[in-house]
Every structure is written in C-alpha cells, then in structure tokens.
Image (cartoon, rainbow, N blue to C red):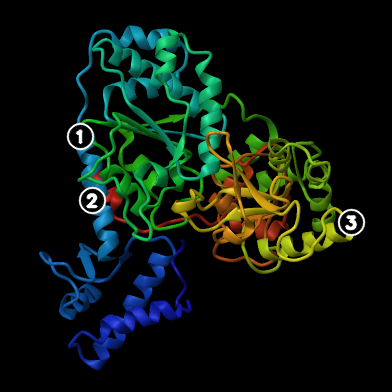
Amino acid sequence: MNTPNQDQQFSRLDSAFAGFLTQRTSLTASQKTKLEALLSKLSYQQSQGHSCVQITEPEQQLISASGLISKNEASPLKLEHNRLYLHRYWFYENRLAEQIKALLPPLQQNNESSSLINRYFIELIDEIDWQREAAIKAMSQSFTIITGGPGTGKTTTVVKILALLQEQASMTDHPLHIALAAPTGKAAMRLQESIGFSKSALPCSEKIKQLIPESVTTLHRLLGANPPSPYFIHDAKQPLVYDLVVIDEASMIDLALMSKLVDALKPNSKLILLGDKDQLASVETGSVLADLTAALPFNTVELQKSHRFQGAIKDLAIAVNKQASDEAWALLKGTGQQISLLTDNLIDYTAEQYAPYLSKVRNNADFTEIYTAFSQFQVLCSNRRGEQGVVEINLQLEAKLQQQNKIHLSGQWYIGRPVMVTQNNPSMQLYNGDIGICLFDKEMSRLTVYFLTADGSIKKVLPSRMPEHETVFAMTIHKSQGSEFDECLCVLPLVINPILTKELIYTAITRAKTKLKIASNYTIFNQALQRRVQRTSGLFERLAGES
C-alpha cells in the first residue's frame, strides 16, 4: 500500500522467491546480494498492491545483467523505463491498456440523440447537470466511467442511460443485450434493488423498461469462473455475448480481474464503470479505477451533487477526503445525533446494537426479516487481528452475548451466528464477501447457513459444506466495500499501522446511511488522515501517453 521503510521485514515467501531467482543467475556474490534484496522488495510491494517498483539506473543495469528479463521471450521479470514488474502483472497492465485504448475512439451519433437526452435530463441554465453529461458521454463513446460519492445518483443515472441506449437501439430493431454486474454478491444485491426502484420512474414505454435487465450478477459469475484454474470461461477467444456491460463498485476491481473483464468484451461492445474513486483501492494489485479516471478525463464524469447523502455524515466524509483532520475531529466531538465518538464500552455498546437482530432470531422470524435486521448495524475495523481488531471483537462479543443469554455457544456453530465467506467457491456459487446466517432449519431438523442471493432467493448450505469463512459481527473496512448499513461503528486500533489511511476512514464513513460512531483517539485519527494510498503502476502512463 505505502512504500515500506528501510527496516521492512520481508516475508519468508518474498525471500524464498528472491533467492530462487537469484540462484539462477551467473552474477557475482556481491551482485547476487543486491539482486536478492531488490527482488524481495518487488515481491513485497506486489503483495501490498503495487503492480511494479521504480528502480534506479544502477538497479536497471543489475537486472539487465541478471538474464531474468527478455524483450521477445517469456521471462520472470519485465523492465520498462524505470519500472520493474513480475511478468504476470506487466502482462495484465499492458493488456488492459491496449484493450482500453481500443474502446476510446468516439462513436458516430445520430440526429435523435439530443432530443432523447432532453426527455430524460432537463437542461439546466445556471449549473452543469453532471448526470446529463454522463449520459452524453455514454451515448457517444464505448467506454465511460461514472464516478461520485454516496448519493450522487450513479445508479439513477445509469438506469436512464440504459433506457436511452435501448431507445436508440430500438430505432434499428436490434435491442441491446445488457449485463449488470458487481464484484461481490452484496454489491450485486444493492445494484439490483436500485435498478428495480429506478426503472418505474423512467419517462419511456413499458417495452423499453422491459429491455432493461434487473438481474445483477457477480463478476466471477459473469465471466464464468472455472476452478481450480485462475482463468475464466469467457476471454478474448470466447467473449461475452453482451452489447453493453455495466459494472458497479469498480474501485474494488484489481488489475488482473479488470484486465480479464475487458479482454472478454466482444468487439464493438460498450463498457460503463460505476464507482467512487476516493474509496479504498482493491485488496489485490492495482488502483485501477483511480488510474483510469486520472488518465482518461474525456471518458470520465464525476457526479458532484449528493441527493441522498446529506448532513453530518457527508460533512465528515468531505473533511476526511481533503485530509482536514481538525475539522473532522471537531465534527465528531459535536453534539449532533448523526456522528459522534464512542464513549461507551465497545463490547457493551455493540451487544446492545445487535439485540434487535438476535431478538428476531430467537422469535423465529422470517429469514429475510432476520437478514434485514442484521444489516441495520455493523462494526467496521481497520485491522483483522490485534487489539480492537475483527477477531478479538468477535470473540469478546460472542462471550458477552453468551453471558447475556442472547446466544448459546455449543461449538463453532450456533443459532444466530453471522458468517462471511472469505474464499471464492464457484461450484457452490458462494463468493468472497457473501454473508450468511446460521439458523435452525425445521425441515431438516439441523443447523443450516442461510444466504440471500442477488436475485432475492434463499440459498441453504450445511455448515460442514461451508467454504472458508469467519464470524462477522465485526468485519474489516476492506470487506465492507459494496455494502451499506443504517448504522456503523468504526473501530480504529490503539497504535498506528500501515493499513490506516484517509481512504480507509473515508470508506468506513460512507458505509453508514443514518448514524456513525468512531472509536478512536485524536492521535491515531489524525495520523491516519495524513496518510494516503499511493500504489506504483504504469497504467496511468500507458493510457495518458507518458510511458
């Protein structure tokens, strides 16, 4: 995420990788020592989200002498200018840039476009309607990025764009085949709900409305996961059948997945990406959405007027985004009801907030009611492990709830245990980030984990068949991307660490719809806001023509 300090301890994997390659060179002992240190750094930086590292001229000469790079043949490493890559990530970055460039030439417009746009978007006299600008771009080009903070109307805008494009296509009697997707099941469910809600208000015929899909899938399902292979069924040789692909929460998509997505588009199709460029970058390699928006301003529209996200939460998000820590802290210490610092005991407060959910569980409410109740409140932690981390809070909370007789621990599984899938399992159609709740299934007379799928149906899984998972009364802020909760409690650690950045805090704040509390002290909060995610890549340079 951030450049490591001089005394950074590389992992055993970093050292083993560096040693493996170094021993296959004919360098001198002194050169091998330097090369091994450089390759350890490359491996470490890649694990931290960087697609490459920038190296000095002497280091470039060392790499060139190592025999580990080749211009025309496959080799472990790639060197471009002062950027050193692992070959795989060079390939993904280079391929993505090539495919994006192929989408950039403007499309030929017909004379009906302006009148169509005027029906959906009123032309403002004294200000710019950024939603209208997004529609104009989407109708005139094959690749469009629509970015903006919470409540700026990204989904509302894209639904109108879908109607516009379908009306345009209906003039030729060839309606568009459209796919809607998101990186996680939860994000897919949110987009599906928004699409269904927004369609009813469209100023178009029922025929056009019926041509706008409401079903939203995950990216892995869209591309056709093919386990145990890292590749997908759909690629350049077997492309997707869709004329238009819309992807929500694009900030979550890493370099490899974005490259595979764009590679799988059929010729002459359109791609629209939706997302908040100020959120956290993907967990894996790259900061693709931020790089794309920076490099391609002509293809990007930032929606700037918030229609839903108002009040103190919005003010706090803005202050955090501009790294105004004193202003943000003053907002938290104010007397408002929307945002505040946590002054109660962390575990006692959390147990109290989950009481309505557990009451639904005890009273055998319908699963959709239980799931909705659970989604009202969420603890978000910066760190998974350590004091005030996810693991510790979940364990302490379970003990408290057991003490209060709200749950009955008799092993790993118990009625009311909420879990999050942590590893994709395409064969079971369960993916990283999917949330399930363990309940007693009367039909089967045993504990069963219930999931609410993107299409609104209920999926049941026996605990013994569950893929990798963890208890999720508390989750990391990274895992919360693509979700919204009525109330959030953001818990920061007692000691500063590399994970803490202003993007992390901004992401946590923007998960809350109506109420937010933050458990932190000023020193940690201030230090976190002064740090930014800065990932090294060459994607911007490739697209902006500066490579």
Is residue 101 visible in the rendered image? The answer is yes
- x, y percentage for residue 10? 45, 78
Where does label 3 land, which residue?
A: 404
Q: CA distance from mark 2 to mark 3?
A: 56 Å
Circle nearer the N terminus (2, 3): 2
The quarter holding residue 51 reads bottom left
**SS label for mark 2:** helix
Identify the residue at the far bottom of this view: 29
Query: Seen in the image, is 408 located left or right of residue 55?
Result: right
Please name the residue shown 62% across and 30% down the image: 309
Earlier residue among tags 3 and 1:
1
Which amino acid type corresponds to the residue marked 3 in the rendered image? Gln
- Per the image, the residue denoted by label 2 is 95
Q: From the viewer's side, name the closer residue of 266 and 352.
A: 266
Q: Are marks 3 and 1 in contact (CB under 8 Å)?
A: no
Q: Disc 1 vs disc 2: Cβ atoms closer than 8 Å?
A: no
- Tell me the kind of residue under disc 2: Arg
Q: Residue at x 31, y 22 (%)?
A: 176
In the picture provided, is 101 more to the left or to the right than 513? left
Query: The residue tagged with tag 3: helix, strand or loop?
Result: loop
At label 1, which amino acid type do we have? Pro
Disc 1 or 2, which lies upstream in sequence?
Answer: 2
Place residue 537 in its image quadrant: bottom left
Q: For mark 1, what is the residue? A: 267
Of labels 1 and 2, the one closer to you: 1
Which residue occupies the foreground of this view, 150 or 305?
Answer: 150
Tell me: residue 248, above or below residue 432.
above
